Image (cartoon, grey):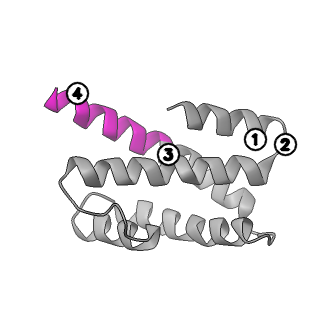
Amino acid sequence: MERLRESQELLDRGAKDAAFVLLWSSVEALLRHIASREGLPLERIPSSAVLKELFSLGFLSRRALDIALRAFSVRNSLVHGFESPDLDTALEEMTPLAQELLAEFDQAGSKTA
């Protein structure tokens, strides 16, 4: 996904806040694509509810849910103009999670194609 690459480029330049917000939007888009692929009508539901619904239906592991919920808190701080002391940890956790979700999405897509 192009956004993941752009997020890494921002991170490499030291723009952690921007990198994280772009990374979050990539993860949220992937989660919504997964929900859509599975026929779940989650387009207009808040991100936190999408996370919990995907977990309850078995599409997200407990570990992935925990990472995403912590990251959601960081996202909320950043987009509302606050600093987050958890930004570095969230970046470290979300980058591999985004890659895992993308791989799962690509793999599932190739099975249905």
Location of residue 96 in the rendering, given as x and y in whole percent from the top left corner: 53, 44
19 or 99: which is nearer to us?
A: 19
Above/below status of 82 relative to 100? below
Above/below status of 97 relative to 86? above
Q: Are marks 4 and 1 in contact (CB under 8 Å)?
A: no
Distance from the alpha carbon under mark 4 to that under mark 1: 30 Å
Q: Which residue is mark 4?
A: 110
Q: Residue furthest left?
A: 112
Q: Which residue is mark 1?
A: 11
Q: Are marks 2 and 4 in contact (CB under 8 Å)?
A: no
Whether residue 90 sits left or right of residue 98 in the image: it is right
Local secondary structure at mark 4: helix
Location of residue 26 in the rendering, given as x and y in whole percent from the top left corner: 52, 46
Q: Main secondary structure of the magenta part?
A: helix
Local secondary structure at mark 2: loop
Badge 1 amino acid: Leu
Distance from the alpha carbon under mark 3 to that under mark 2: 19 Å
Badge 4 amino acid: Ser
Give residue 14's mark: 2
Badge 3 amino acid: Ala
Q: Residue at x 36, y 54 (%)?
A: 32
Q: Are marks 1 and 3 in contact (CB under 8 Å)?
A: no
Which of disc 2 and disc 3 is earlier in sequence?
2
Q: Residue at x 76, y 69 (%)?
A: 84
10 Å crowding of disc 4: few (<14), some (14-19), many (20+): few
Give residue 62's mark: none
Which of disc 3 and disc 4 is earlier in sequence?
3
10 Å crowding of disc 3: few (<14), some (14-19), many (20+): many
Q: Which residue is mark 3?
A: 98
Distance from the alpha carbon under mark 4 to that under mark 3: 18 Å
- The quadrant in which residue 3 appears is top right
Q: Which residues are magenta?
A: 99-113
